Amino acid sequence: MGPIVGLADAIVDITSSGQTLAENGLVPIATLGAATARLIANPISYKMHFSRIIEVVRRLEPIVLKGEERDDPDLADLGR
C-alpha cells in the first residue's frame, strides 16, 4: 500500500508467488535473496511433545517433497 499512496518507493515481498505485487500493480525489480523454511524444536519440547512434532513432520513431508505451495485444510490445525 505504501507505494500506491506515495509513502514508499518500493516494498519487499517475501513470498515467491508475486501475488501481492500483482494485486498492487507492482512488478519485481530485483531478487534480494532466497529463503527457506525450517522446523525447529528445542530439545526439551522435542522429548516432551515428540509424537505431536512427528505428526507435524509426517503431514508436511509429502508437501515438501512435492515442492508444492498450497493452502491445505488438512494442515490448518498443525499449530494447535
Image: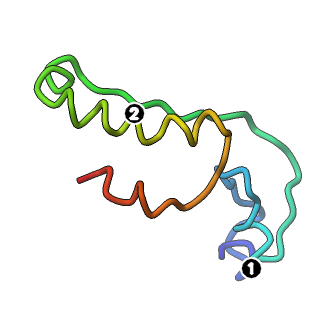
Place of residue 12 in the rendered image (x, y in percent of width and height, measured from the top left):
69, 54
Give the spatial CA distance, label 1 vs label 2: 40 Å
Q: Secondary structure at mark 2?
A: helix
| Numbered disc in front, either 1 or 2 | 2
Place of residue 48 in the rendered image (x, y in percent of width and height, measured from the top left):
11, 26
Label 2, residues with CA under 10 Å away: few <14, some 14-19, many ≥20: some
Instruction: Name the residue: 20% across, 17% down.
Output: 43
Task: Kindly give the residue lying farthest to the bottom in the view shown.
Answer: 5
The residue labelled by disc 2 is 57
Q: Amino acid at mark 2?
A: Val
**Does 42 sit left or right of 30 as displayed?**
left
The residue labelled by disc 1 is 4
**Does 36 sit left or right of 39 as displayed?**
right
Instruction: Name the residue: 50% across, 34% down.
Output: 61
Place of residue 60 in the rendered image (x, y in percent of width and height, measured from the top left):
47, 40
Q: Amino acid at mark 1?
A: Ile
Q: Secondary structure at mark 1?
A: loop
Q: Quadrant of residue 26?
A: bottom right
